Image (cartoon, rainbow, N blue to C red):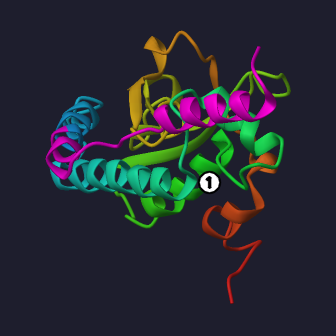
Amino acid sequence: MLTVSRLSALLLTLLLASCVSTGTPDERQEKARRLRHDLQQLSPTVSAQEADRLATTAIEESAKLSSDFKPLIYPWMNNGLVNTGLRKRGLCYQWRDDLFPHLFRLNLKTMDLHLTASKRDTWQEHHGIIVTAKGQRFEDGLVIDPWRHGGRLWWGLLKNDKKHPWKPLPRDLTPMVLRPLLMPDLYPTR
């Protein structure tokens, strides 16, 4: 029979063994190269330099967030720790809200960034960022999701992401932390 201390030790071992690695700098550089390629496939109008900056920033900032949040390999386990108060942060909207300003400040001219949500107001609600070529339809965009693999940035075409029926986040649901970026007229910074 397992005692409470043995069960606790077993659970701690499992949790520690399931922490996420974001890879070596060389592995992240290769991943940024693949993301840059996929961004450029959105449209011939996407600047190679902007795609490179966006890809590198998204990969590296996701890795930094992983270092801060220390997620477990299964996102639902991490959510459980946050929701029970054992971790302060690390829910999908927090990953999105922390990554978005880094991408926004790139001041992209050939691509647009969109806040997005899937299955809003359900227990399966999920948040991410959609990147489109400037003026391109939301539905033709690329999903950027730092939470799905705990800091190892996941991306893919929105139309191919069968797990999540992504919709643009309504303007009135823009997170307060992002409103000064997205609505500077209404929320001026000091």
Q: Indicate the amino acid at tag 1.
A: Asp
Residue under the image location 62 percent in, 37 percent down: 12
User: Compared to 102, does 25 lie above or below?
Assistant: above
Q: Residues within 10 Å of mark 1 (few under 14, many from 20)?
A: some
Residue 179 makes an appearance in the image: yes
Q: In this view, does 10 lie to the left or right of 35?
A: right
Q: Is mark 1 on a helix, strand or loop?
A: helix
- Relative image position of residue 44 (x, y in whole percent): 20, 35
User: Compared to 89, does 74 lie above or below?
Assistant: above
Quadrant into which the N terminus falls: top right
Q: How many marks?
A: 1
- Relative image position of residue 66 (x, y in whole percent): 47, 50
- Relative image position of residue 129 (x, y in whole percent): 53, 40
Q: Is residue 183 left or right of residue 20?
A: right
Residue under the image location 74 percent in, 55 percent down: 175
Q: In which quarter of the image is residue 117?
A: top right
Q: In which quarter of the image is residue 118?
A: top right
Residue under the image location 18 percent in, 41 percent down: 27
Quadrant into which the C terminus falls: bottom right
Question: Is residue 11 magenta-colored?
Answer: yes
Q: In this view, does 18 lie to the left or right of 124?
A: left
Residue under the image location 41 percent in, 31 percent down: 154
User: Compared to 152, does 156 lie above or below?
Assistant: above
Question: Is residue 189 magenta-colored?
Answer: no
Between residue 59 and residue 16, name the one nearer to us: 16
Q: Which residue corresponds to mark 1?
A: 97
Q: Give the range drawn in magenta.
A: 1-30
Q: Main secondary structure of the magenta part?
A: helix
Residue 117 makes an appearance in the image: no
- Relative image position of residue 143 (x, y in whole percent): 46, 31
Q: In which quarter of the image is residue 152?
A: top left
